[in-house]
Amino acid sequence: MTTSTTFYTKTDYDKICEFAGSHFEYDDGLIVWKYNGQVIEDEILTKLLNQEDIQIYLEMATHKHYRITTNIYRKLSKVLDENLFYIYANSPNICILINGKEKIRIPDVTITPHKETFSRDNYVTNPLIIFEVVSPSSVTIDYIDKLREYKAIETLQEYIIVEQDKNCLVHYQRVSATEWTEEKIETDKDFLYLPTVSIKLEMQEIYANCEEL
């Protein structure tokens, strides 16, 4: 199979996600696998748009990836003030306009204000905090591509990249419109503090029950 040479609309993207699940992201007219950023072949996309049941290899997250994401989501769900914030796991779609190009990302965990702002296409436009758990094939995407894109979101205050092969995360925090701080947290005894929502996450909570995976 060859890679895609066709321009796809956000409507095409939404239709594919509705039929086949949130395994994909949108990159300026191209539809790519969420976990490695590779462009999907036209043959596959055509069948998905036609809602044909086909056997394809989906780029799935690892069990440890799911465990870490679940740990973060559950902990935050317990302590977030639901009158002030919403929290999502593997949703919602975040639409980003950067250098004139439209990107649609689906963060692993997202915190938004209680009063979310949606675009006309029903994408959330005002996330406050985003977590991405690094997959083996997504290191470059999470540390370079998504870092640049997420910094372009005016409402975003914090971006956290969580490693899964070691207990380590990198916390980016907005200082001004153009300045961000960067903090690396590596030991089990340390914790992540999210000043935007005044919540502390212990590293042991983030990586709970991951040893056997």
Image (cartoon, rainbow, N blue to C red):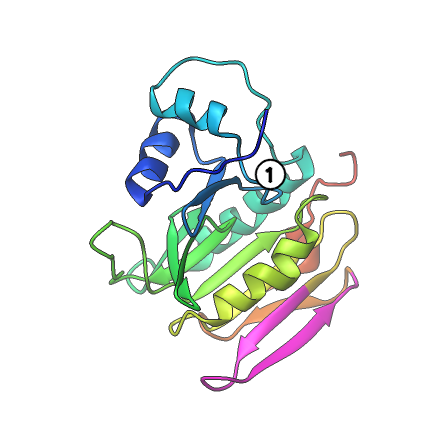
- Closer to the camera in the image, 80 or 182: 182
Q: Residue at x 76, y 34 (%)?
A: 213
Seen in the picture, residue 6 relative to 92 is either above or below; the reply is: above
Residue highlighted by disc 1: 66
Residue 98, quarter of picture:
bottom left
Seen in the picture, residue 6 relative to 149 is either above or below; the reply is: above
Residue 199 visible in the snapshot: no
> Where in the figure is residue 151, as x and y percent of width and height?
50, 71
Q: Residue at x 63, y 63 (%)?
A: 144
- Closer to the camera in the image, 198 or 152: 152
Judge from the rendering whether residue 52 lies leftward or rightward of residue 180; answer left or right: left
Is residue 176 magenta-colored?
A: yes
Q: Secondary structure at mark 1?
A: helix
- Closer to the camera in the image, 173 or 150: 150
What span is in magenta?
170-187
> Where in the figure is residue 174, as x and y percent of width and height?
51, 79
> Where in the figure is residue 90, as x and y percent of width and height?
47, 44
Q: Is disc 1 surrounded by few (<14), some (14 to 19) or many (20+) residues within 10 Å?
A: some
Residue 162, quarter of picture:
bottom right
Residue extending farthest to the left is 120
Secondary structure that dominates the magenta span: strand
- Closer to the camera in the image, 34 or 205: 34
> Where in the figure is residue 77, as x and y percent of width and height?
44, 51
Seen in the picture, residue 143 relative to 30 is either above or below; the reply is: below
Q: Residue at x 72, y 70 (%)?
A: 184
